[in-house]
Amino acid sequence: MSRAQLILCWLFQITASAILAFAGIHKMMSADIQVEMFTSLGMEPTGRYIIGTLEIIAAFFLLTDALSAAGALLGLAIMLGAIIAHSTVLGVSPTMLLLFTVVICCLIVAYIRRENLPFVGKIMW
Amino acid sequence: MGFTKAESRISINLERLSHVANSSLYLLIIGFFLLGHFVSFYFHFGTVAFTFLTILNIYYLYIQKDHALLSNFGFLAQLRYILESVGPEFRQYLYMSDTEEKPFNRMERAEVYRKSKDVDSSSAFGSLSNFGNEEIKLRHSMYPLQKSEQLPFKLTFGEERGCENAFTINRPFMISGMSYGALSDRAVRALARGAQKAGIAMNTGEGGFPKHHLMESCELIFQMGTAKFGVRNNDSSLNDEKLKKLSQHEQIKMIEIKLSQGAKPGKGGLLPKEKITEEIAELRGVSMGEDILSPPFHVECTTPEKTVQFIKRVQDVSELPTGIKLCLGRPDEFESLIRAMKKQNIFPDYISIDGAEGGTGAAPKSFMDDIGVPIYRALPEIQRILVSEGVRDKLKLVAAGKMIDAGRQFVALSLGADAIYSARGFMLAIGCLQSLQCNNNTCPVGITTHDPHLKAGLDIEQKSQRTYNYAVNLWHDHEEILAALGKRSHYELDENNLFIPKYF
């Protein structure tokens, strides 16, 4: 990985991490909009806490060197769930812009750090 | 399609299982999606997980080309790689029998561990060794001696030629060459401190100036490899000045010229520039930023005559007892070397014979497995040549090669050796688990690694006590066995003490 790639990668990591952390913390703090969303999904409050925890974990992983690839993968998984939620139950909303930002950032991070991806790279753990 | 008679046997067809698994992934996504949509959104956890697994599986099946197994069978084939990767641990912990592992089986290692921890080492019920006409055994005497009747062990290197700085050892075993570089600094210091406590000598290995060995106050034998690290010119020739300066260290008692090594006889080495830190460059006397080649032979030693002259040169410059270390290859070459010594009346103070089974930090597998003569075959051969040339009393013989217990050491001593070198025995004593990772910088017990996290676990004081215990208990075994053989000293051992099975 070249130095330029590394810096670029960290920019995307930080962006994705910030959005995920923001969303995760809001879920854990029972923000009105989140409670509303999870009520319509029928996952209030357990599901909200699970997803919030996962988002915070992904945000944390994205800020490390060794686990950022795994963090990107986890971020993508959460976002896939969010896309399903928006397309089947919640409907289109402006928050989806943030959602796709995370998807793009995570895809780029996972690509740049593909050597470290679990199950694809060389080591599993 | 013809119908065959139905059978009620059940067997698992892994190929079909993997095909079923691969195609059912798609159905699982659809199933979970529907459940998530109509029953509970929680089912979408399954949708997401199986979507990822499917993408991964598509990558395995259609994109990657590295592994045929993954291309043909998909994600279930990963089980093979996962299980294979933990195989060594499982075999060592659970499945391999006590006498099965190589190079040292669990029984042999456990004996070293017991000695080093100073715990009772009696065993019950019966021996786990083979008695099938293939192992060498010791012959005891009908008239054993009391231990009090034994003479103290004393072996003086350099006495034959009246060397001023002749070096006497009081135990028949020494720690063989392990350099700083191959070993971590903490491992070196633990061994050196233990050697000092136990009063045994330690070889420095060919790692250049033995800075870490010298931090403890044990007696050292400086080993000079073919690259002559620490005492070299840039073309791998000997720098007399540096050798002279090094020899003046109080602790350095002997010099050993390594002609070849049992684990990789006839092979040089390459120190890649990535491994050359500032410290290594300084200790070894090499420049940073370029690969350093160890030639397969000493540039001075191209003929028997020149080899003998080189030995003389080292003896003169260092003013210390000087030995050579080699693994026996062709006996006729060894014979001509001895003849050249006789002709010039110059002899090394000792010859250390490394068996082909000797250890190494890293060597090509074919060299480890297939080149060189094993110690039990090499020793009698060398003894025969030395005796028939009439020069056996001009030098000492030291034997090395898996000499981790007193039994093996006694066989070597009976075959003609005067003393024993062991490296891996002492590594086991300071906690080596034989995880076979010496060349990966990942040694889990911090012995052959420079990873600060891994070597942090190696406590120098505690492990030096283990070294000491091992040496003391090894000596205890020596005394007991010697008494059982009815001998008063190690000098009285000869081939008649051995039961060497021959096919009848």
Image (cartoon, coloured by chain):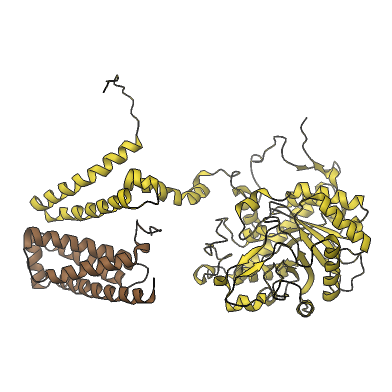
Chain colours: A brown, B yellow
Q: Nearer the viewer, residue B128 or B226?
A: B226
**Quarter of the rendering occupied by the N terminus of chain B:** top left
Q: Identify which residue is drawn at 37% across, 68% down.
A: A66
Residue B167 can be seen, yes or no: yes
Residue B348 can be seen, yes or no: no
Q: Identify which residue is drawn at 17% across, 68% down.
A: A100
* Residue furthest top as drawn: B5
Q: Nearer the viewer, residue B357 or B299?
A: B299
**Quarter of the rendering occupied by the C terminus of chain B:** top right
Is residue B394 toward the left or the right of residue B411 in the image?
A: right
Q: Is residue B33 above or below residue B235?
A: above
Q: Identify which residue is drawn at 72% across, 57% down.
A: B474
Residue B429: quarter of image: bottom right
Q: Is residue A100 above or below residue B60?
A: below
Percent coordinates x, y for residue B104 in the rendering: 62, 50
Percent coordinates x, y for residue A22 in the rendering: 19, 74
Q: Nearer the viewer, residue A113 or B395?
A: A113
Q: Is residue B16 above or below residue B489?
A: above
Is residue B143 toward the left or the right of residue B62 in the image?
A: right
Percent coordinates x, y for residue B332 in the rendering: 83, 50
Percent coordinates x, y for residue A118 in the rendering: 34, 59
Q: Identify which residue is drawn at 16% across, 68% down.
A: A99
Is residue B221 toward the left or the right of residue A18 in the image?
A: right
